[in-house]
Amino acid sequence: ADDRASCERLADSAKHSALHALEFIRKHQSQENSDRLFSVYKDGKARLNAYLDDYAFMAMGALNLSRFSKTIAESTALLGLAKRWVDVVNKHFRDPSHLGFYFTSDDHEALLCRPHTLFDQAIPSGTATQLHVMTVIAENFSEEPYFVELTEQIHKLFALVEQAPNAMGELANATLLYFISPILVSGHHCEQLCINPFIFPKWTEEETPTQK
């Protein structure tokens, strides 16, 4: 019992710290009247357009925080935030050939070559993280453009996964989530089920447990 209580206190502390960090970025690194972000904050000033990884991991962070929210308002707000950052990536970072996403936005300074981030490095690739989050967003909001984009991306990119699975573990996870489909649950204490990485919250007005 003591160990469980200790773990719960640690988890609550981690969630509080994550929410605090998220709020700081929303307050100090968000571009005015926009869902766009700045990548750098120093000496009280934010600058430089955010990159693919910034949006993808912020969307993933918001999505994961929504999984453990205990109120409809907080969970819905965090899921909506993740959706808006996914939309920014789809609009400004998308490769028209559906082969992943560029690391820089379409209004970034001109470069000799706009790099892709398809392979995992010290951290998972921005492309794989974006597709992982988009799979959950598509299931929650049931909007056709997300499903179309996911289908195009997954089917084209999986050939690379087959060739280099050790370098594309996160994309393999995103592909698995795409094919088995996220499980959506709602109701009181639904956050307890979301310990499973493929289970996500979807609250209903009646707050009765449902599963999809």
Image (tube, grey):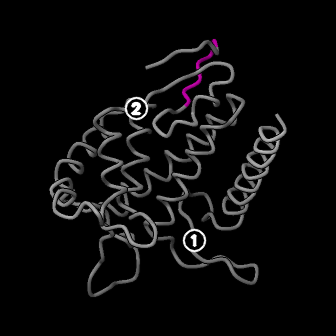
Identify the residue position indicated by label 2 in the image.
139
Quarter of the image for residue 167 reads bottom left
Which portion, as a residue range, is magenta? 201-206
User: What is the three-letter code of the residue carrying label 1?
Assistant: Phe
Neighbourhood count class around disc 1 (C-alpha, 10 Å): few under 14, some 14–19, many 20 upward: many
Quarter of the image for residue 146 reads top left
**Residue 165's x, y, as percent?**
25, 60
User: What is the three-letter code of the residue carrying label 2?
Assistant: Glu
Of residue 109 and residue 168, the one placed in the foreground of this image is 168
**Distance between the Cα atoms at labels 2 and 1?**
29 Å
The single residue placed furthest to the right in the displayed view is 2
Q: Main secondary structure of the magenta part?
A: loop
Q: Residue at x 40, y 45 (%)?
A: 134
Q: Is residue 132 left or right of residue 48?
A: left
Label 2's element?
Answer: helix
Q: Is residue 164 left or right of residue 62?
A: left
Label 1's element?
Answer: strand
Quadrant location, the C terminus: top left
Q: Is residue 192 magenta?
A: no
Q: Which mark is residue 38?
A: 1
Quadrant location, the N terminus: top right
**Residue 119's x, y, as percent?**
31, 68
State whether residue 123 is above or below residue 172: below
Neighbourhood count class around disc 2 (C-alpha, 10 Å): few under 14, some 14–19, many 20 upward: some
Quarter of the image for residue 140 reads top left
State whether residue 63 is above or below residue 198: below
Mark found first going from the N terminus, 2 or 1: 1
State whether residue 56 is above or below residue 79: below
